[in-house]
Amino acid sequence: MRKRRASSIIAPALRWIVTLAILLVFNSPILGTIITSFKTKADISSMPPKWIFHPVLEHYQNVLYAFGYDFPKFFQNSIVVSLGTSLLVLAVCLPAAYSIVRYDVGGGRPLIFVVSLRLLPVVVFTVPIFILFQYVRLLDTRIGLILMNSLVSLPIALLLLVGFIQDLPRAIEEAAMIDGASTPRLLWHIVLPLILPGLGAATMLTFVWTWNEYLLSLVLTLRKATTVTVGASLFVTAWEVQWGEIAAAITLSVIPTLIFVMLTQRHLIRAISFGFLK
């Protein structure tokens, strides 16, 4: 009896210890960045690293109020571009996925073509897109970033929504059509509520990828549409690398994605349980 009680206590404790150890290992870069953002320059460069130090807000003040460095503007650009990309991707992928599944548009070839584009590295598109955007005056604009990020995010979102719509029973849609529902009304009132987990997962993946994207923002922006990922790299100068400011900028830039993931994680969990990653 005592052995059973001991095992019932030890087993959960071991599981918690292992779980906490895994979380610590995988989150150590984030924790290290946050800790670095509160250190002075002397503490950051000290060897061995100091784990006990007097925290300061100097780096956050430099990030938010430094002359010639408009972090709030970079932050605003990232929010607008990420939200705009997510909305555009959903607006395109929902009717496209429904057309591919229910009307067999193109015999499934459009899906194969779109997904195959995602197999190419993003750097392949940067030079021609830069020349095109310069010609049509979309360089260094939020609209240009939204269009380019949407192009990159479309394949995953489309593949995701196609899988969800394929699992929907046709009987529900046929009953709505018998009642006189048009295709737009069918999509809005019937299909969309049933695939909310897929929409939530697609939105979260698109938002997070767009927020963290660096290469396109570096190539296609100069100053007006600069995002936080590129803005953080501006603290790498020809004279020094300002690690404290970089850590503070990264810490601030993580907050929106953390909030967004917390709000949409239940949809991603439901999507995984429904088997969209099969």
Image (cartoon, rainbow, N blue to C red):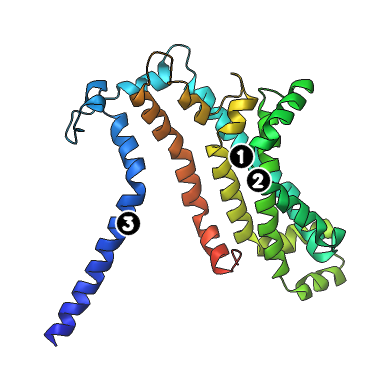
Image spot of residue 152 (x, y percent): 67, 43
Name the residue type under label 3: Ile
State the residue position of label 3: 22
State the residue position of label 2: 153
Question: Among all residues in the image, which is located at the extreme bottom?
Answer: 1
Name the residue type under label 1: Leu
Mark sitting on residue 83: 1
Displayed quadrant of residue 60: top left
Relative horizontal placement of residue 225, taking residue 29 as reference (left or right): right
Q: Residue at x 20, y 29 (%)?
A: 47
Element class at badge 2: helix
User: Is any part of residue 95 visible from this angle?
Assistant: no
Alpha carbon distance from label 3 to label 2: 30 Å
Q: Earlier in the sequence, mark 3 or mark 2?
A: 3
Displayed quadrant of residue 128: top right
Eyeballing the image, is 267 above or below 48?
below
Image spot of residue 119 (x, y percent): 66, 49
Dot 2 crowding, Cα within 10 Å, few <14, some 14–19, many 20+: many
Residues 32 and 175: in front is 32
